[in-house]
Amino acid sequence: MLIDSYDRVVDYLRISVTERCNFRCQYCMPEKPFSWVPKENLLTFEELFEFVKIAIDEGVKKIRITGGEPLLREGLDIFIKMIYDYEPKIDLAMTTNAYLLKGTAQKLKDAGLKRINVSIDTLKPDIAQKIAGKDVLKNVLDGVEEALKVGLKVKVNMVPMKNMNANEIVDVLEYSKNRDMTIRFIEYMENKHAIADISGIKSPELLSILKKHYEFEDEGFDGASPSHYFRMKDGYRFGIIEPYEDDFCKKCNRIRLTAEGNLIPCLYFDEAMSINKAIKSGDIKAAAEVLREVVRTKPEKNRWGGEDGEVSSRAFYETGG
Ligand code: SAM
Ligand code: SF4
């Protein structure tokens, strides 16, 4: 079992299989980065799988494939099948912008994928164009319908922003509710890669908007999930991800692996340790030691909302959110 120095069990690995993306979301990757990681530095799916086996053997129970946009990486279904065949009980999920999901949902499901989180910030084509930098909405919504059709469990992620999609909070919730998909509103997390003038909506404001339309009760947190849940009278549950809150990191159970093989103990900080050399040279022992060391050095909490006004320089498209 992997336990950090604050007694948190770390059993959730998020793997960013590529930093590349077909969207240019304003809060994540508004412009193409100056350079991508050179192809030869990336871990192949076989190499990533070598690390996955170590992580599962050390106690990881949940794996999320993310990116960048994970569906851009060819052979993803084969990678998912490798993980599933190694441990069919693993909670295997993916976060995607859904643009390429229509043509891929069935084979991902067949490979062993159980759940997906889809980013839907708007239901208006022009706002989607504004946020993502291209005309994406139809493909995204078609992708969601396909995922539901093939039997994947779907959750929706929305990042509410002032002067952008704030007036669609109820609409996106209703869209999700009508399809039995839990929605999680993610507070915009400031970072140096986002465009400068984004103004996110924090939890209290979001709740006051929702209170004008619904009655609901605070259900608190669900296990180690970062989401603060609320339940409506008819049983529908929605969540808010509140990284600026003091107790957000208390139950953090996750570490992140980038496509290049950097293991990152916390989404906020730049610190990372590489498993690239160890895995590429087949040194399983050394890779397992890096994993344990990264867990040991996991910080107690992030610094969003900290008093020093510091802004995270981590790129969400690199860490996978
Ligand atoms: N491309 C996929 C997608 O968009 O779902 C997966 C990667 S993306 C980095 C994962 C999640 O991070 C998305 O739900 C996205 O909305 C969220 N995200 C990215 N930048 C963010 C930011 N600055 N603040 C809050 N959430 C962010
Ligand atoms: Fe791409 Fe996802 Fe980042 Fe948007 S949030 S730019 S879709 S990685």
Image (cartoon, helix red, strand yellow):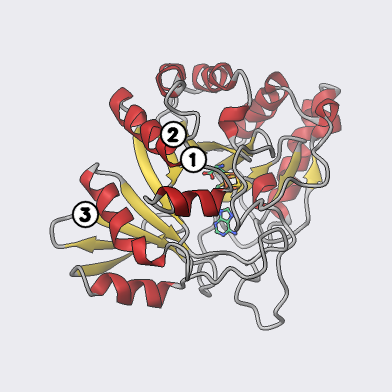
Q: In this rendering, which labeled residue sits more in front, label 3 or label 2? A: 2
For the point 58% across and 22% down, the residue is: 76
Determine which quarter of the picture holds residue 300.
bottom right
Give the camera-side residue of 146 and 54: 146
Q: CA distance from mark 1 to mark 2?
A: 6 Å
- Which residue is disc 2 drawn over? 139
Give the camera-side residue of 168 and 267: 168
* Badge 3 or badge 2: first in the primary sequence: 2
Which element type, helix, strand or loop, lies under badge 1? loop
- Looking at the picture, how far across and down is residue 217, in whole percent? 23, 69
Which element type, helix, strand or loop, lies under badge 2? helix
Marks 3 & 2, CB-CB < 8 Å contact: no
Amino acid under disc 1: Val
Amino acid under disc 2: Asn
Marks 1 & 2, CB-CB < 8 Å contact: yes
Classify 10 Å Cα crowding around label 3: few (below 14), some (14-19), many (20 and above).
some
For the point 57% across and 16% down, the residue is: 78
Q: Is residue 253 left or right of residue 46?
A: left
Classify 10 Å Cα crowding around label 2: few (below 14), some (14-19), many (20 and above).
some
Give the camera-side residue of 89 and 309: 309
Query: On residue 136, which mark appears?
Result: 1
For the point 27% across and 49% down, the residue is: 175
Q: CA distance from mark 3 to mark 2?
A: 26 Å
- Which residue is disc 3 drawn over? 236
Could you tell me which quadrant the N terminus lies in? top right
- Looking at the picture, how far across and down is residue 128, in whole percent? 47, 50
Classify 10 Å Cα crowding around label 1: few (below 14), some (14-19), many (20 and above).
many
Vertical placement of residue 102 versus 191, above or below:
above
* Badge 3 or badge 1: first in the primary sequence: 1
